[in-house]
Amino acid sequence: MTRVLGWLAALGLLAGLAAGFGYAPREVVQGNVQRIMYLHVPSVLTAYLAFGLVLLGSIAYLATRRPGWDRLAGSAGEIGVLFTGLTIVSGSIWGKPTWGTWWTWDARLTSTAVLFFIYVGYLMLRSLIEDPDTRARYAAVVGILGAVNIPIVHFSVKWWRALHQPSTLLGPGPSPIDPAIGLALFVNWIAFTLLFAYFLSRRMEIARLEEQT
Amino acid sequence: MPANWSYVIAAYGIAAVALLGYWRRLASRRRALTARRAPNARPT
């Protein structure tokens, strides 16, 4: 199953590249640099998914005390940090030619950086505690508290005046995106979700092996 | 608006390095754990 997911993710990423660079048109205002969106937006959506699973695994662990839920939360947290890092880096690179700066303390950027450091702290906490039950319990509490920042990141562009544009995909009302650009974005989002599922499957297997050795 | 391909290449290049690096890290970690388990699995 994991191998199949890996191949599907690889094919999805190739299709995503073809859609983003071959099928989608050059954006009129920003030019080719807008193609970073096919990396940036799927990365943040994947990070949301990962941290959502951290929340689910954390709540389920505290309710059932089954180690499988803790494995899910810990594994998803690690992958979520990876994709949040990609979101920040790709956004920064996109920001330089469009906003004229690599970084600004805008509400969306700042809350995303906070999200990143919360889950880096979550992973550090997991690595510092040796006793599996204590680690899982403490991590679950942080995993639940950390999830509070996810809606703050998402709605920050609505709640505060921000340089970052408002949500176009998960915003209210129909999306204003050109259908060809929207399709390329959708293909890349599916590819990133498949890649996340593949990484999660591999990481959870490793966590299970770590518990047995 | 200039083409700005260098920014696009930088973003995708960094992403490729990060994702491939993580994939390789998972693979090597799994190999190490499997190798560590293998002697324990044999009957003594």
Image: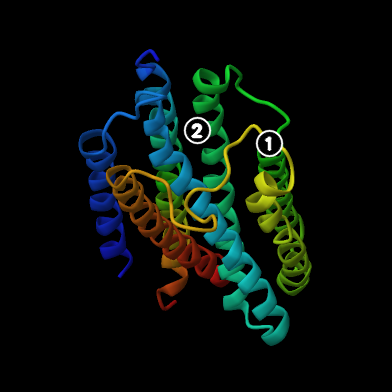
Q: What chain is tagged by disc 1?
A: A
Residue type, label 2: Ser
Query: Is B23 left, or right, of A85 in this rendering?
Result: left
Residue A35, by quadrant, is top left
How many C-alpha atoms fall within 10 Å of the one at disc 2: few (<14), some, or many (≥20)?
many
- Residue bearing mark 1: A162
Q: Which one is in front, A21 or B31?
A: A21
Q: Is residue A20 above or below residue A176?
A: above
Q: Is residue B14 above or below residue A212?
A: above
Q: Nearer the viewer, mark 1 or mark 2?
A: 1
Residue B44: quarter of image: bottom left
Q: What residue did someone put label 2 on? A: A90
Position of A126 with respect to A36 (left or right) is right
Q: Nearer the viewer, residue A39 or A183?
A: A183
Q: Measuring from the top left, give residue A98's x and y in whole percent.
A: 51, 22
- Which residue occupies the extreme bottom position in the image? A64
In the image, taking residue A65 as reference, residue A100 lies left or right, namely left
Q: Which mark is residue A197?
A: none
